Image (cartoon, helix red, strand yellow):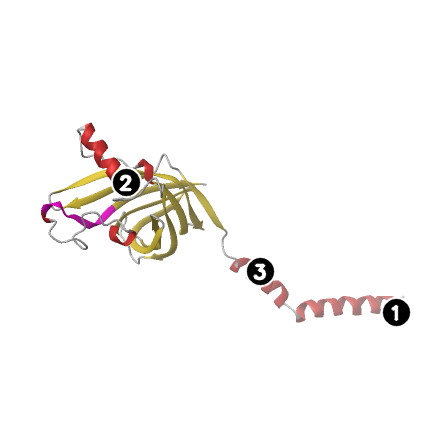
Amino acid sequence: MKKYVVLASLASAMMFTAQAGNPSTVVETAATEAAAPAKVRAYKVDVAGSALKWHAKKVTGEHLGNLTLQSGDIQVNGNKVVGGTFVIDMASITCTDIKDQGSNTRLVNHLKSDDFFSVEKHPTASFKITGVKPIANAAAGKPNATVTGDLTIKGITNQVTFPAVLSVKNGVASAKADVTIDRTKYDVRYRSNSFFENLGDKAIYDDFTVTLDVTAKL
């Protein structure tokens, strides 16, 4: 009987020693679980709840209007925006500052023509976020990140960078920013004083601004 008791004791001791001698198994497992990154989740853009506004200037004045997102998503890791893709419906372009309907229609049709955005050939534009860098000590309501991404217009892609206010809260991700775009980089050169001389008061400035207010939800 004593022989069996001794054997049982030895077996228990060996098992305890093996576990005690290799504590890293439990520690490594816990560390791995703790270090595992949060899963990146795609928040679908609320097209109806998002807005894009454009603002272009010329020597003698300016024009304003709207655009509509066709689709998109904002990539979120934990409570931080880390990426996103957006498709813009170029056929949705409108003008909001010209009240005369005939003049308004002529301008919109001109913007859709090959002089500007060639909407029939290129019905959409797109933007893909390639980098998000936090801005340290950003005040509430002020840009808290620098966003970099690839903007494609008329099939031409260029990198753009701009400050943005990004937020993720209660299952809703949002992005607000003013993006300055050099139209000549996308072969939109109509009446550009960078390419044509002696335009006088007919010149249109190369840079235009798109103000975005995008909301996305799980």
Earlier sequence position, callout 2 versus callout 1: 1
User: Which residues fall within the magenta stretch?
Assistant: 201-209
Identify the amino acid type marked 2.
Ser
> Which of pointers 2 and 3 lies earlier in the amino acid sequence?
3
The residue lying toward the viewer, choosing from 175 and 5, is: 175
Quarter occupied by residue 14? bottom right
Badge 3 amino acid = Ala
Please give the name of the residue rendered at 21% of the width and 32% of the height, measured from the top-left corner: 104
Q: Find out whether residue 130 is within the magenta segment.
A: no
Q: Is residue 98 left or right of residue 49?
A: left
Marked residue nearer the N-terminal end (1 or 3): 1
Q: Residue furthest right?
A: 1
Mark 1 or mark 3, whichever is nearer to me: 3
Residue position for label 3: 30
The residue furthest top is 101
Report the Cα–Cα distance between label 2 and label 3.
Answer: 61 Å
Find disc 1 in the rendering and name its residue.
3
Crowding near the residue tagged with mark 2, few <14, some 14–19, many ≥20 C-alpha atoms within 10 Å: some
Q: Which mark is residue 113?
A: 2
Residue depicted at 53% across the width and 58% down the height: 36
